[in-house]
Structures are given as structure tokens and as C-alpha cells.
């Protein structure tokens, strides 16, 4: 801001700076006040990729992913450019959170001061955006709001310089505004549309729809037909996965699932696809009751579902949870509400994921046999029911009391499916 107004750049609120800040500013907003960089650099492609290589410890990964996507969407709503997150290799816009020296000529300066910076569009480091990990990143009015700063930085990454319009996002002072239903201010929209043109609305009617960009359903493609339905009342029955969802138990096998309601006897068999059309197979599943979401895993991907609705924006890669690329699939998963941890079982090891921080506990992976004595050496399916955990290893299942870390009973899987 000091630079912009021709003051000495001290980073401090000295008298000169305060004088300038107190001055009334021209409120005429029908004049464009945005700026572009010298040479008007811009992205000359329709899809710009981004990758977040280092996350902040202030927010969960999911919150960061969602907020970064939301910041890009402010622009993709108004210009014909799409942004796509990638999880490996080099993206057009590489994003990281790091303190102090972080690999370029602009080391960060500790708490406050510079919050973030971004390069203008171009090859190599062009567009790259860095956030100072010494700031307190938030999704609220306290600390530094990530959406607003990311949206400002992505303005730079798309070719916008600072604006002289005090109501613009690209105005060079940080000011919190309510971010609910936040849209790109007019001046920034005109500035970015001058570089990229206007996104022509796909739908001629201007009535805002509840979900402006629903996920395109990959539906009509003929899907691999599920094989014959699995046999229910078989002592050797092995589940691929099991979970509770809204008080009912779901047992997955091949392309099918059985649903067992607590409230009435009887077990229903359905294809997975007929209920959650974007999902074919489930290797592992867990319910996070506090969010009313269940997560399904297949290979290196996962989906989120709410009841019988698959949520948009999936599948996503399991690397989001912090799995290394050596983990090719997950055998089973269960959430432990009392610890806020989700346990993922992979081969003879399990991983403990802290849902609050969005990170794996540093103890991960650890040995199943050592920490869960008596349940076997692997876990094909796991779920929670009335305070007990149920672990299946092959056709055998153990009922386990987590608080006392004791096995209570040994059962067979098929015992859940009303076979007597
Ligand atoms: N970072 C500055 C900024 O993004 C870096 C910068 C200074 C800059 N001059 C520039 C970048 C010229 C491109 C072109 O503006 S910052 C704000 C705001 C910062 C500042 O950390 O000071 C925001 C980051 F606008 F509030 F001042 C985000 Cl929103
Ligand atoms: Zn940097
Ligand atoms: Zn800026």
C-alpha cells in the first residue's frame, strides 16, 4: 500500500501512512480502476492447473482445498477459464504455505507484514503463489482470511495488478468482508474480463440455480456390469467393506451392498451403483457422524456421500489424507468419535488420521497385531456399532471394546445378515 501511494515502504503504520489511509477516496465506481502488469501477461490456455505442495497447519487439508477452489471459482464464474487441481507433477500454478525462506528471492517476514505473494502469468514460476505459514490462516474474520488473500493473490496470478478502487479485491490493503456468498467485485471482474473475455453463460436464464455447476455425470457410459450377486448366508462370507450410515449398517461385497436397518428385521441387497451412481466398488468405508458424511474408498480414490446422495467434486485421491503413493488401496476404515481419529487398515499396518487437523498422526503406520491384540493381522472390513468396533479378518469377525482395548467376542461375518 505504501509503495502504491508513493510512500517509503516501511511496513509500519507511521503518520504518513495513516494520513493517506484517512483520506477520503474517490467513490466513483463506474470508471475502471483496475491495473494489468506490464506487457499484459495472461494464460493462453483454457484450463489452468494448480497444485498445493505444502499445506498450512492452521486448517485441515480439506478446508484448504475447498477454499483455494472457491477462490479460483470467483474468477472461473466470470471468465472462460477453468481451474483444475492436480496432485503430482508440475502445475501451472504451484501453491505452498511456508515461513521465511522458501526457495525464491522473497523470503517471508514472520507474523503479519507480507502475507502472501504471487507471480504474474507465465512459464516456470509464473503464477506460483506462496502463503506465509507464520500468519494465522482462518476461514473467518479473525487472523488472516484465506479466501480473501488467496482470491487477491490469484488476481495477480491471472495478470491483475493493484486497483485504485477501494472496493476492489485488488486494492492494496487487507480488509475483511463477509465471505458468505462472496463474488468478485465489479472492478476486478472488469479487469480480468479485459484480459480473458467474458464467460458466456451456459444457461440463458439468469435465475441463480442452487448449484451453478453440477458435476457432469459420467452416467450413460455402459458400466462394467456387476457380476452375480454374492451369496448372503455363507459361513465363509468375506466383506470388502462395512460402515454405518445414519443408523443403518452397510456391508459391501463386489458391486453390491447389503443394508441392515436397526429398526426392522430384514436385509436389503442393492448394487452400489444404483444408490450412488458415481461409485462402482467399495474397498473401505467409514462414517463421520458429526459431518453426516460417509467416505467410500476404492483403489487410490475416495468419494463422500450423504445418505444416499454422492456429494459433488469426487472422486479425489487418497493422497489428500496423507497416504504415500505406495498405498494402492485401503482394506478398511473406521472412525473413532472419542478420539477424533479415523483408522485406516492397509495390509498388516494401520494409519491413524486426525480429522480435526486433517493430518496423519506421526505414529502412522503402526502394526495392527501389536496395537490391536486378538483381532488378527489384517482387517478387511471395520465398523462401529453401539460402542463396539467390529473387525473382520476373512470370514472371522471380532467384537472389540476400544476403550479397554479388549476383544469381547469372536463372530462370523454372516451373523449380521439374518442367517440363522
Ligand atoms: N503481498 C503483496 C500483494 O499481494 C505482494 C505485492 C506487493 C505485490 N506489491 C505487489 C504483488 C505488486 C503483485 C504486484 O499485494 S501482501 C494484500 C492486500 C498482501 C496484501 O502479503 O502484502 C492482500 C496479500 F491487498 F490486502 F494488501 C494479500 Cl489481500
Ligand atoms: Zn515466495
Ligand atoms: Zn497484491
Image: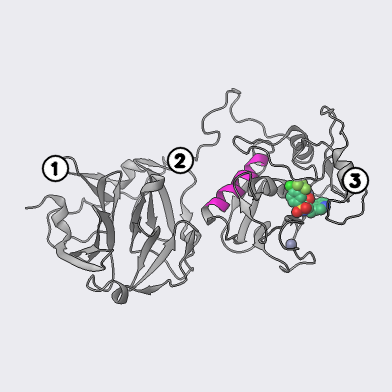
| Secondary structure at numbered mark 2 | loop
Where residue 36 sits, quadrant-wise, is: top right
Asked which quadrant contains residue 179, the reply is top right
Q: Which residue is mark 3?
A: 5
Residue 10 falls left or right of residue 94:
right
Of the two numbered discs 3 and 1 in the rendering, the one whose residue sits closer to the viewer: 3
Q: Position of residue 232 (x, y in %)?
A: 15, 53
Which x, y percent locates residue 375?
Answer: 23, 70
Q: Residues within 10 Å of mark 3 (few under 14, many from 20)?
A: few
Q: Is mark 1 within 8 Å of ligand 1?
A: no
Q: Residue at x 46, y 60 (%)?
A: 318
The location of residue 266, given as percent across then percent down, is 14, 43
Q: Is residue 107 above or below residue 85?
A: below
User: CB of residue at label 2: within 8 Å of ligand 1?
Assistant: no
Near-viewer residue (253 or 211): 211
In this picture, is 110 found above or below 188? below
- Between discs 3 and 1, the one toward the N terminus: 3
Tell me the distance, in whole angstroms, between the alpha carbons under discs 2 and 3: 50 Å
Q: Which residues are magenta?
A: 63-75
**CA gap, disc 1 to disc 2?**
35 Å
| Residue at 54% across, 51% down | 63
- Asked whether 1 or 309 is in front, the reply is 1
Q: Which mark is residue 265?
A: 1
The residue under label 2 is 217
Decide if residue 390 is in sight here. yes
The local secondary structure at tag 1 comes to loop
Query: Marks 1 and 2: CB-CB under 8 Å?
Result: no
Q: CA distance from mark 3 to mark 1?
A: 74 Å
Amino acid at each position: 500500500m505504501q509503495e502504491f501511494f508513493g510512500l517509503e515502504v516501511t511496513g509500519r503504520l507511521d503518520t504518513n501512512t495513516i494520513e493517506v489511509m484517512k483520506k477520503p477516496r474517490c467513490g466513483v465506481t463506474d470508471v475502471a480502476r483496475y491495473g494489468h502488469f506490464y506487457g499484459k501477461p495472461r494464460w493462453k490456455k483454457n484450463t489452468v492447473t494448480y497444485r498445493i505442495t505444502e499445506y498450512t497447519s492452521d486448517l485441515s487439508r480439506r478446508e484448504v482445498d475447498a477454499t483455494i477452489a472457491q477462490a479460483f471459482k470467483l474468477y472461473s464464474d466470470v471468465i472462460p477459464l477453468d481451474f483444475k487441481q492436480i496432485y503430482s507433477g508440475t502445475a501451472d500454478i504451484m501453491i505452498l504455505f511456508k515461513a521465511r525462506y522458501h526457495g525464491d528471492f522473497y523470503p517471508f517476514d514472520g507474523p503479519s507484514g507480507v502475507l502472501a505473494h504471487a507471480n504474474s502469468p507465465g512459464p516456470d514460476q509464473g503464477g506460483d503463489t506462496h502463503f506465509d505459514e507464520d500468519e494465522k490462516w482462518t476461514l473467518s474474520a479473525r487472523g488472516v482470511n484465506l479466501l480473501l488473500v488467496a482470491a487477491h493473490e490469484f488476481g495477480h496470478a491471472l495478470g491483475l495488478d493493484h486497483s485504485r478502487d477501494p472496493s476492489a479485491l485488488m486494492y492494496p490493503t487487507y480488509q475483511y468482508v463477509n465471505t458468505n456468498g462472496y463474488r468478485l467485485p465489479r472492478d476486478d471482474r472488469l479487469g480480468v474480463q479485459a484480459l480473458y473475455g467474458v464467460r458466456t453463460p451456459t444457461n440463458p436464464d439468469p435465475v441463480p440455480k442452487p448449484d451453478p455447476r453440477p458435476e457432469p455425470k459420467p452416467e450413460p457410459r455402459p458400466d462394467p456390469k456387476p457380476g452375480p450377486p454374492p451369496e448372503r448366508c455363507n459361513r465363509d462370507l468375506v466383506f470388502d467393506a462395512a460402515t454405518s450410515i445414519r443408523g443403518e449398517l452397510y456391508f459391501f461385497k463386489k458391486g453390491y451392498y447389503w443394508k441392515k436397518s436397526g429398526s426392522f428385521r430384514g436385509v436389503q441387497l442393492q448394487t452400489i451403483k444404483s444408490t450412488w451412481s458415481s461409485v462402482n466398488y467399495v474397498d473401505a468405508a467409514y462414517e463421520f457422524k458429526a459431518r453426516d458424511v460417509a467416505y467410500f474408498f476404492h483403489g487410490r480414490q475416495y468419494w463422500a456421500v450423504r445418505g444416499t446422495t454422492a456429494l459433488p467434486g469426487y472422486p479425489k485421491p487418497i493422497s489428500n489424507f496423507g497416504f504415500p503413493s505406495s498405498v494402492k488401496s485401503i482394506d478398511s476404515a473406521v472412525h473413532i468419535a472419542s478420539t477424533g481419529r479415523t483408522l485406516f487398515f492397509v495390509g498388516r499396518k494401520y494409519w491413524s488420521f486426525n480429522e480435526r487437523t486433517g493430518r496423519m498422526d506421526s505414529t502412522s503406520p503402526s502394526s495392527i497385531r501389536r496395537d490391536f491384540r486378538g483381532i488378527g493381522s489384517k482387517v478387511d472390513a471395520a465398523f462401529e456399532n453401539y460402542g463396539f468396533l467390529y473387525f473382520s479378518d476373512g470370514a472371522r469377525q471380532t467384537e472389540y471394546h476400544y476403550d479397554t482395548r479388549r476383544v469381547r467376542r469372536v463372530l462370523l461375518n454372516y451373523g449380521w445378515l439374518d442367517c440363522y
